[in-house]
Amino acid sequence: MNKHKYFVSVHGRSVLMARGATTYEWEIEATEDEAQEIRNLMGLVKEKEENAFLGFVFPWPDEPERVVNVTYQNALDDVYQRIYEYGSIDTRKQMKESGVNAFLNSYDG
């Protein structure tokens, strides 16, 4: 499959082909399936974020805050892992310089 440039906003939860359609943080080169994978992962982040929110509003005394956050953080880490894997040279460089990918030592393909 052909790869295309996509512009990704984790904050805005978007993966778009049009550079000026919205603000973005990262540029990737991916197939449509790979771009959809990132969209799906960002949907999972949203779901985990909403679930974690309930834990803050109605905290369970026997469940520490870090336990509430761990599934959200794992989902977010998966998003950044894929962005790094499909990222342009500039994206990878920016992620390394900013420390966003401190947990991404396993992939350098």
Image: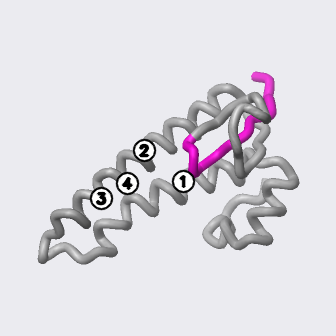
Residue 1, percent across and down?
Answer: 75, 22
Mark earlier in primary sequence (1, 3)? 3
Identified by mark 4, the residue type is Glu
Q: Is residue 53 left or right of residue 45?
A: left
The label nearer to you, 1 versus 3, is 3
The label nearer to you, 2 versus 4, is 4
Mark earlier in primary sequence (2, 4)? 2
Which residue is at a point 33% across and 74% down the rendered structure image?
Answer: 66
CA separation, marks 1 and 3? 20 Å
Q: Secondary structure at mark 2?
A: helix
Residue 38, percent across and down?
Answer: 58, 40
Identified by mark 1, the residue type is Asp
How crowded pointer 4 is (Cα within 10 Å; few <14, some 14-19, many 20+) is rated as some
Q: Is residue 5 magenta?
A: yes
Q: Marks 3 and 4: CB-CB under 8 Å?
A: yes
Mark earlier in primary sequence (1, 4)? 4
How crowded pointer 2 is (Cα within 10 Å; few <14, some 14-19, many 20+) is rated as some
- Numbered circle sitting on residue 78: 1
Which residue is at a point 80% across and 24% down the rendered structure image?
Answer: 2
Identified by mark 3, the residue type is Phe
Question: In which image quadrant can residue 39 be found?
Answer: top right
Q: Which residues are magenta?
A: 1-13
- Numbered circle sitting on residue 53: 3
Q: Is residue 55 left or right of residue 84?
A: left
User: Looking at the image, is 105 positioned above or below residue 74?
Assistant: below
Q: Marks 3 and 2: CB-CB under 8 Å?
A: no
CA separation, marks 3 and 2? 14 Å
User: Looking at the image, is 55 positioned above or below residue 48?
Assistant: below
Give the residue number, with chain letter if any, for mark 4. Answer: 49
The label nearer to you, 1 versus 4, is 4
Compare residues 32 and 42 and report the one nearer the observer: 42
